[in-house]
Image: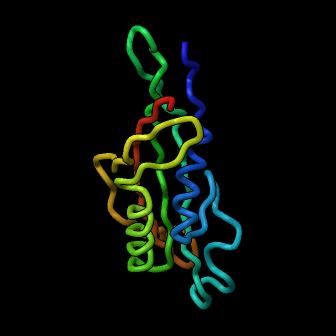
Amino acid sequence: MIPIAPTTPHTNAVVAAITAVPMLVDRAKQPAGSGWQGTPGASTFVRYAVVYPSPGIPDGNAAEPLEYLDYAAQINVFGATETQVEGATDDVRAALIGQRLTVSGRSTYRVQAAPGQAPIIRDDTVPTPVYMAVVEIAFRSQPT
């Protein structure tokens, strides 16, 4: 029987695709060197993305019930302005949607946008507001 595929290599592939944009990205935390580079609102803001991966869902048939892994992730994209975050979101979507990511030992289907995307929001809970957009993706992989 094929073992359950680990999700970490799938997340690595998502992070690599976003890094190649180029854009700073990390898993479940703000990447070092991103955001305000000095006084908030009076300095440069380096846009960034934060990937929140899912644990994945195994799928298959009676002969190989764990053959496939259905992977999903939420990617939060941040910018100082609505325009900056919209452009950053366009870059993240272009790097992922419709692409076949490289996952060692696995063949991947093209990355799809998950339905029901949320609009860009402004975070007014911080002294200098920032904007955030969410890109939700999903793709399937199987052993090569």
Residue furthest out toward the front: 144
Up-down: is 10 above or below 33? above
Relative depth, front residue between 99 and 39: 99
Up-down: is 118 above or below 44? above
Horizontally, residue 115 falls left or right of residue 76, namely left
Name the residue: 38% across, 14% down.
61
Total number of numbered discs in the rendering:
0
Instruction: Give the image quarter of residue 5.
Output: top right
Horizontally, residue 105 falls left or right of residue 60, namely right
Locate residue 124, reporting x and y percent: 48, 71
Relative depth, front residue between 118 and 106: 106
Horizontally, residue 88 falls left or right of residue 29, namely left
Instruction: Give the image quarter of residue 49.
Output: bottom right
Locate residue 19, reporting x and y percent: 58, 64
Up-down: is 142 above or below 24? above
What sort of colour scheme is used for the picture? rainbow
Name the residue: 55% across, 79% down.
128
Name the residue: 39% across, 77% down.
82
Q: Quadrant of the N terminus?
A: top right
Relative depth, front residue between 137 and 97: 97
